[in-house]
Image (cartoon, helix red, strand yellow):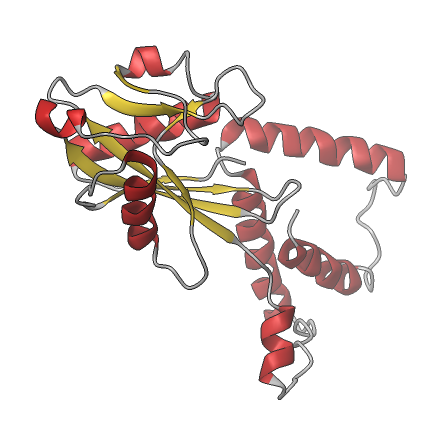
């Protein structure tokens, strides 16, 4: 759970700790842990975003406790030093991918041999530079990786990937339009980073790119057809 959720839990724990537990309520940590685990599993099965559902419920309980006289959450310590405040902010990386198709509506994928996984294909794209807007990242990455200027269209999908050995990552998928055979002939891959490219159906792409990437690609394709923007929150 995120720090905000833990903060709400801590506030409610202090507030409820002033009262006697309800009749028959267990105070055994093992029993409570088992009940909490069962509840979280059931919640995860009922919603795609269990953390958001839990936080929303805790927030509603927090509001009710304020109405009943509970002390509000403590505010953060004020620090007039803007540099120190900026340095204390959490980091989040940004990257873009571009959905480009041919005239048969097959998607352009590039092979990334530096990845040590079997499915080492992916959409053209990469990480944003400092202070670089996502759509500019998309233009730059296409030019660097494919050696062609791709007109970047609208945003199709956005995904958030939790922290691993890197900070959390936001990925933006943009529409790169359809390429004519003449433009496809002009593709020249970035030397040393990409080994080959090809155009594939969604079904064929499922065998080439990681499962999470295929979910993202499918959502972007659907958004391209519907005019919507897909918001994926893959936890």
Name the spot of residue 221 as percent of width and height, x first: 25, 28
Judged from this view, the residue extending furthest toward the front is 191
Judged from this view, the residue extending furthest toward the right is 28
Please give left or right for residue 225 compared with residue 79 in the image.
left
Name the spot of residue 169 as percent of width and height, x first: 51, 46
Q: Can you say whether 189 is above or below 82 in the image?
A: above
Q: Residue at x 64, y 28 (%)?
A: 41
| Nearer-the-camera pick, 67 or 206 | 206
Snapshot quadrant of residue 194 = top left
Snapshot quadrant of residue 204 = top left
| Nearer-the-camera pick, 46 or 220 | 220
Q: Can you say whether 191 is above or below 67 in the image?
A: above
Please give left or right for residue 97 compared with residue 23 in the image.
left
Please give left or right for residue 79 compared with residue 135 in the image.
right
Q: Can you say whether 39 is above or below 174 in the image?
A: above
Q: Residue at x 66, y 76 (%)?
A: 76
Q: How many marks?
A: 0
Q: Residue at x 22, y 40 (%)?
A: 228
Please give left or right for residue 179 compared with residue 49 in the image.
left
What is the quadrant of the C terminus in the image?
Answer: top right
Residue 173 seen in the figure: no
Residue 86 seen in the figure: yes
Name the spot of residue 84 as percent of width and height, x first: 65, 78
């Amino acid at each position: 759970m995120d720090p905000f959720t833990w903060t709400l839990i801590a506030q409610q724990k202090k507030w409820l700790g002033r009262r006697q537990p309800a009749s028959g309520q267990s105070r055994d940590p093992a029993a409570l842990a088992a009940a909490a685990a069962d509840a979280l599993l059931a919640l995860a099965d009922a919603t795609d975003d269990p953390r958001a559902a839990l936080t929303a419920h805790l927030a509603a309980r927090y509001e009710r406790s304020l109405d009943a006289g509970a002390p509000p959450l403590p505010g953060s310590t004020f620090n007039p030093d803007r540099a120190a405040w900026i340095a204390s902010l959490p980091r989040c990386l940004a990257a873009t991918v571009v959905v480009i198709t041919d005239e048969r509506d097959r998607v352009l994928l590039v092979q990334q041999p530096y990845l040590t996984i079997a499915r080492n294909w992916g959409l053209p794209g990469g990480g944003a530079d400092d202070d670089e807007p996502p759509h500019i990242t998309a233009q730059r990455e296409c030019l660097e990786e494919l050696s062609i200027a791709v007109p970047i269209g609208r945003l199709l999908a956005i995904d958030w990937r939790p922290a691993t050995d890197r900070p959390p990552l936001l990925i933006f998928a943009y529409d790169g339009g359809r390429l004519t055979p003449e433009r496809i002939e002009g593709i020249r891959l970035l030397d040393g980073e990409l080994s080959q490219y090809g155009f594939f159906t969604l079904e064929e792409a499922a065998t080439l790119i990681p499962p999470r990437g295929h979910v993202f690609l499918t959502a972007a394709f659907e958004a391209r057809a519907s005019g919507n923007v897909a918001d994926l929150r893959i936890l």
